[in-house]
Image (tube, helix red, strand yellow):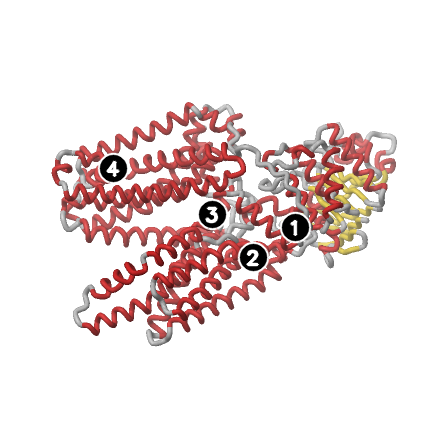
Amino acid sequence: MLNIENLTKTYGEKKAVDDLSIHIAPGEIYGFIGHNGAGKTTTLKACAGILQFDKGEITIDGVSMKNDPIGCKKKMAYIQDNPELYDYMTGLQYLDFVADIYGVSIEERKAKIHKYASAFELEKDLPAVISSYSHGMKQKLAIISAWIHSPKLIMMDEPFVGLDPKAAKLLKDMMREICDEGGAIFFSTHVLEVAEKLCDKVAIIKKGQLIRSGTMEEVKGDDSLEDVFLELEGDKQ
Amino acid sequence: MIKALLKKQFLELFSVFLRGKDGKRVSGGKATLYIVLYALLILTVVGYSSMFALGLGFTYFQNPDTAWAYFGMGAIAAVTLSIIGSVFMTYNSLYLAKDNEFLLSLPVPSWKLLFVRLFGVWFSGFAWESLVLLPFYVIFYIMAPGLVTALGVVFQILLWIGLSFVILFMTAILGWLIAKAATHMGRYKTLIIVVLFLAGFIGYMALISQLQNGIMTLFEDPEAVAGGLGAFVPAYAFGKGCLGSPLEGIIFFLVSAILFVLVYWVLTISFNKILLTNNKGKAITSDKRQDKQKSVNGTLIKREFKHYFSNAMYILNSSLGYIFLPIIGILAVVNRDAIQVALTNFAASGTAAPEDMAMAMALIKLLSPMAVFLAVTFLAGTSVITAPSISLEGKKIALLQSFPIHMKQVLWSKIEFHCLIALPFTIPSVILIGIGLSLEVLDIIALALLSAAIIFFFGVFGLACNLKHPMLNWTNENVALKQSASVLLCILIAFVAPIAFILFYLFVLGAHFPTFAYLFIVAFIFGLVSWLILIWLNTKGAEKFQYLS
């Protein structure tokens, strides 16, 4: 579903991502972990088509991000680490805006909005302007907007930040549901327990380089993901 | 402590010169560009102030008894410009600053925070005031050296500071009114703020007119002046003070100091409440469901509409010209006969022979369409909706970039929106002004076409400039609205381009070339340049927008 081949991105002298390769198959929830500044957000942004990269190739469902960025974006959705949404719209107007951009029919969007907004207990807040939302509510709205056009791939940067336990559980279920339908999820997180329980595969990145990746068992073996991560990062005392 | 807080305040104020989009120091070239642009703007304002001062000097320096009116009018002009220039900064700085809660959480006494906040607001008003008042002082020293006294110079310095307190008082009150309106008005917040600002502005202009009448009354009633009643007219007190009259000077300074203390005291006792009150206002709600799927272009334009009409600062900073144009047009038609009489009288003044009069009328006929061209370009160039529109996307720009749409669609929606707002105001207004000035039909048609070309030009030019010099990391939308290089460049072009075209017409082509034909040519040039910029926007511009961060 998502192929990242030899991705390299530099900022001036600094290599933010260095020759990174990751392959995510349909049906997989793929976790992406690393320290702050390791290159996770840079990678996700490059995959979302909002950051130009220097070398390598990214394909989504066989479509090249370099050659057909619009084709790629039709197949995926991206949620930023900080939900920056249009404060001047109501929740409902924002969802309609996103649905219009993706060409989602009125009937389909109504059904989706009802399904997810009621699940997130956000339905009564949708008529309110987004500037009145809390961080968690914005995050829920961003999640609903990502799901509204049934993308094959959803990429998320720290999606659980700001969500209450119930919403976090719901998001995990939604992620699994997408994968069960043949889609894929690629997300970054610092919550290693979540990654350990939720992910089919995981990649650990350090200073822009992939230092380990594979199935959860391959990466952590009999240890906890936290122990492995800290050991690989050289932080374990 | 105060030093650190002031440093933060000034870093915010001068961020445009210091930090680039990546948060690092801006390059020398870019900083130079900003400095040059600001210098040109400052020179323009100083130039206009100096011309105004010269005109007043010729009127009021004839008689030493009326010289105070020169400074009085200067003070009125300074206060007007300062209020327009800094009222929304006051509103944003005091009531909407994003770091209010953070600052309150610091172990810093409230009065220090308030002092720093007010200092920023005061500095803005003081800077605007100085641009007007200092040229007045200089022209005074040049034109009326006989009236300069040591005490007068001392009071000029004192009252220069005193007037800035008056400005602070007035902007704080207006800012407070706007904040109150914003808190209580909910859905109609933007409309109320725009109306409130315009009402305040018109009210202020009416007050100025009253003050002018007051000045005339004082001229006609020397006893009132002699009896000291004039000291109650602020302009009189300011003017007399600047000439070295201690009573009026001290009264004005004391009153302004009292106003400053009053503002500081009121804000101190209500500081925490002001800062912690959610001045965003009542949550606006709308449960209206969209019943028809929109095209991508349609939904992008709708987004621009929503953004624009949600932000009073955006409307007032980028559309004030379009609000004034219809007013000018209607006034021109209503006063059509009076304008003709005034123009005839103007032509008659200084002309002795009938042929001179005919020549003067012909010159007026020739220059009238050019004057309309100058006015429209100036108003359009200072009202470019696209100029700050990319900067205003801020960090939310990533949303658009991640959607499966071509970025030229986004850019085009911004240009289209600018034209949708500007054209319906401009074209009918230009036609009305043309009728009011009794222009030839062909001139009116040419002006209407030229206005459309100018609107389109500024739409694409403002957008292209903003794309070249975006400012996405703002903490306050006002920074994007007022300090974007694109906004300054548009204003600069609005000043320079029409004058260059008119001078070329007058001194190169000569008066025998038909005005309508020249205006058509200028329209074609604006159109051609716009088309070239549009090609850049659709190709390299769109690519640049895709990866802006």
Relative to B457, say whether A175 is above or below: above
Determine whether the residue tagged by mark 2 lies in a helix, strand or loop. Answer: helix
**B431 vs A101, nearest the viewer:** B431
Q: Disc 2 designates what residue? A: B416
Question: What crowding class fits label 4: few (fewer than 14 Cα within 10 Å), some (14-19), or many (20 or more)?
Answer: some
| First-in-chain label (1 vs 2) | 1
Q: Is residue B32 visible?
A: no
Same-chain status of marks 1 and 2: yes
For marks 4 and 1, give the CA distance: 55 Å
Q: Disc 3 designates what residue? A: B483
Label 3 marks a residue whose chain is B
Label 4 marks a residue whose chain is B
Relative to B98, say whether B367 is above or below: below
Same-chain status of marks 2 and 4: yes
For marks 3 and 4, give the CA distance: 33 Å
Determine whether the residue tagged by mark 4 lies in a helix, strand or loop. Answer: helix
| First-in-chain label (2 vs 4) | 4
For marks 1 and 3, give the CA distance: 24 Å
**B305 vs B161, nearest the viewer:** B305
Question: What crowding class fits label 3: few (fewer than 14 Cα within 10 Å), some (14-19), or many (20 or more)?
Answer: many
Q: Disc 1 designates what residue? A: B401
Label 2 marks a residue whose chain is B
Same-chain status of marks 2 and 3: yes
